[in-house]
Image (tube, helix red, strand yellow):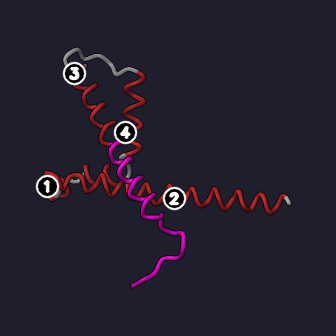
């Protein structure tokens, strides 16, 4: 079994909390933007600035894995029903790892700046 270098993967608590919060917010924003779009469907009105911002936020949070999976007809068939949440969770897991790397990078740069300034 391959061992990852220390600090490469986030701590379990950080990972689980991040994945749960990120996936919940992602799905909630998707539902809000879908409901807003359906509410103006009959009138044909253009989306408001708030609706556009929410849609862009939803798209950003659901990228890249969920967006790619939803564009594939094969995976849409394979991941029907409750399995459809797997791409959302995988996407949130990717975001958790990237967020952890950014946190570690910022910490590293702060420490380097402090030691260089002394």
Is 42 magenta? The answer is no
Seen from the viewer's position, the closer of residues 19 and 53 is: 19
Seen from the viewer's position, the closer of residues 10 and 31 is: 10
Element type at mark 2:
helix
Mark 3 closeness class: few <14, some 14–19, many ≥20 residues within 10 Å:
few
In-image side of 87 versus 4 (left or right): left
- Circles 4 and 1: CB atoms closer than 8 Å: no
Element type at mark 3:
loop
> Can you give x and y, in whole percent of width and height, for residue 20 in the image?
35, 51
Please tell me the numbered disc located at residue 77: 1
> Can you give x and y, in whole percent of width and height, for residue 110 in the image?
71, 56
**Marks 1 and 3, how far apart at CA:** 27 Å
- Circles 3 and 2: CB atoms closer than 8 Å: no
Looking at marks 1 and 3 on the same chain, the residue that comes earlier in the sequence is marked by 3
Seen from the viewer's position, the closer of residues 16 and 116 is: 16
In-image side of 97 versus 28 (left or right): right
Q: Residue at x 23, y 21 (%)?
A: 39
Quadrant where the image shows the N terminus: bottom left
Is 20 magenta? The answer is yes
Please tell me the numbered disc located at residue 58: 4
Q: Residue at x 25, y 49 (%)?
A: 70
Looking at marks 4 and 1 on the same chain, the residue that comes earlier in the sequence is marked by 4
Extent of the magenta region = 1-26
Please tell me the numbered disc located at residue 56: none
Q: Residue at x 37, y 53 (%)?
A: 19
**Disc 3: which residue:** 41
Element type at mark 1:
helix
């Amino acid at each position: 079994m391959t061992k990852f270098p220390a600090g490469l993967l986030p701590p379990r608590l950080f990972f689980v909390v991040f994945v749960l919060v990120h996936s919940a917010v992602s799905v909630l924003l998707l539902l809000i933007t879908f409901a807003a779009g359906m509410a103006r469907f009959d009138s044909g009105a253009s989306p408001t600035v708030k609706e556009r911002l929410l849609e862009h936020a939803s798209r950003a949070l659901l990228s890249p894995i969920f967006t790619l999976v939803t564009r594939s007809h094969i995976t849409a068939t394979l991941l029907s029903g409750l399995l459809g949440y797997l791409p959302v969770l995988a996407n949130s897991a990717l975001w958790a790892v990237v967020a952890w790397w950014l946190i570690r990078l910022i910490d590293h740069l702060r420490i380097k700046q402090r030691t260089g300034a002394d």
